[in-house]
Image (cartoon, helix red, strand yellow):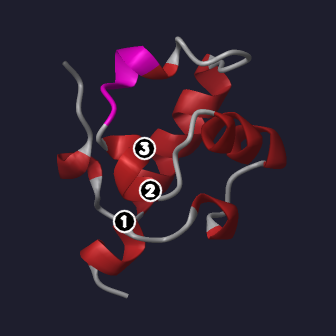
């Protein structure tokens, strides 16, 4: 898969823990692209979101060389 295909992957198809998937889906996020469009500091506004969840997302993005897509501000 190319980067855009990976970013368009539905949340439920990502290798995230079930609790992280539920948190993201409850926020109306449907794809990885929608997740990275939200600044990282805003992720912590999601109910039950923890730093563990942040590391889970960041590790996945690093593994696939997608960190350039992440918004930090």
- Quarter of the image for residue 64 reads bottom left
Which residue is denoted by mark 1 in the rendering? Answer: 7
Instruction: Give the CA separation, mark 1 to mark 3.
Output: 9 Å
**Residue position for label 3:** 35
- Residue 12 in percent (x, y) is at 69, 63
Q: Residue at x 59, y 18 (%)?
A: 46
Asked if the residue at tag 1 contacts the one at tag 2, i.e. Cβ–Cβ closer than 8 Å, the answer is yes
Q: Position of residue 56 (x, y in %)?
A: 59, 41
Q: Nearer the viewer, residue 31 or 69?
A: 31
Q: Compared to 25, does 45 lie above or below?
A: above
Image coordinates of residue 7 in percent, x first then y, are: 36, 65
Whether residue 62 appears in this view of the structure is no
The residues colored magenta run 38-42
State yes or no: discs 3 and 2 in contact (Cβ < 8 Å): yes
Is residue 67 placed above or below 43 in the rendered structure?
Answer: below
| Quadrant in the rendering for residue 5 | bottom left
Number of the label disc, if any, that sits on residue 32: 2
**In the image, 15: left or right of 45?**
right
* Disc 3 packing (10 Å; few <14; some 14–19; many ≥20): many
How much space separates mark 3 and mark 2, taking CA atoms?
5 Å
Q: CA distance from mark 2 to mark 1?
A: 5 Å
First in residue order: circle 2 vs circle 1: 1
């Amino acid at each position: 898969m190319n980067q855009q295909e990976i970013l368009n992957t539905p949340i439920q198809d990502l290798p995230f823990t079930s609790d992280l998937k539920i948190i993201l889906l409850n926020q109306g996020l449907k794809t990885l692209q929608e997740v990275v469009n939200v600044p990282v500091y805003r992720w912590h506004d999601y109910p039950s979101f923890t730093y563990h969840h942040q590391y889970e997302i960041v590790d996945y993005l690093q593994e696939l060389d997608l960190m350039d897509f992440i918004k930090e501000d």
